[in-house]
Image: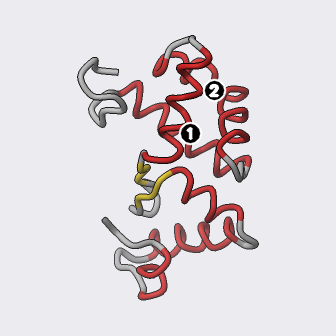
Amino acid sequence: MNGEFPYCETDSVMDRLKKVAFDTLWRYGSEDCGGWINDLLACYPEEVADALGNNPPEVFAALTDIWETTDYEDPRTGFSMTYQKWAALFAVEYGLEVYEALVKSKEDKAEISPVEALLFPRR
């Protein structure tokens, strides 16, 4: 972290953590915070330690806060939601398929449909 603001957007170490945190949701479909933290620590321990340190209670508290309050803007879609909301999207039946269809649609055209606007409101 930059020492001034936790989870600061300008911190490249935190940016890397945000990317792998999203990747964990997308690949492993963690439906709850505890499962996501376990998957994240199992798959990306170095990224977590680099961004948040090695003190387990502090890391768990920081990751819980990130899950609940930190928005991640997906570069493939341009949509921004908390990790908790991304997990809810991926957890529903056909959630990943809807996401992949949205990605393909965004690659094919630059504008969004009314359905996309309802599913993923821009901030």
Instruction: Check whether the beta carbons of the residues at disc 2 and disc 1 lie within 8 A of each other.
Output: yes
Q: Amino acid at mark 2?
A: Tyr
Q: Is residue 13 left or right of residue 2?
A: right
Q: Residue at x 59, y 19 (%)?
A: 57
Furthest toward the bottom, the residue is: 114
Q: Which residue is mark 2?
A: 44
Judge by depth and name the residue closer to the eye, 75 or 114. Answer: 114
Q: Residue at x 35, y 74 (%)?
A: 110
Number of dots carrying numbers: 2
Q: Earlier in the sequence, mark 2 or mark 1?
A: 1
Q: Residue at x 39, y 73 (%)?
A: 121
How is this picture coloured? secondary structure
Q: Residue at x 54, y 16 (%)?
A: 49
Vertical relation: 24 (above or below) 12:
below
Q: Residues within 10 Å of mark 1 (few under 14, many from 20)?
A: many
Image spot of residue 36 (x, y percent):
67, 41
Vertical relation: 51 (above or below) 86:
above
Vertical relation: 117 (above or below) 22:
below
Image spot of residue 101 (x, y percent):
59, 73
Q: Is residue 54 left or right of residue 94?
A: left
- Between the C-alphas of marks 2 and 1, the distance is 9 Å
Vertical relation: 45 (above or below) 37:
above
Q: Amino acid at mark 1?
A: Ala
Q: Which residue is mark 1?
A: 21
Give the image quarter of residue 81.
bottom left
Give the image quarter of residue 7.
top left
On-image quarter of the C terminus:
bottom left
Image spot of residue 17 (x, y percent):
49, 32
Q: Tell me the SS state at disc 2.
A: loop
Image spot of residue 91 (x, y percent):
71, 62
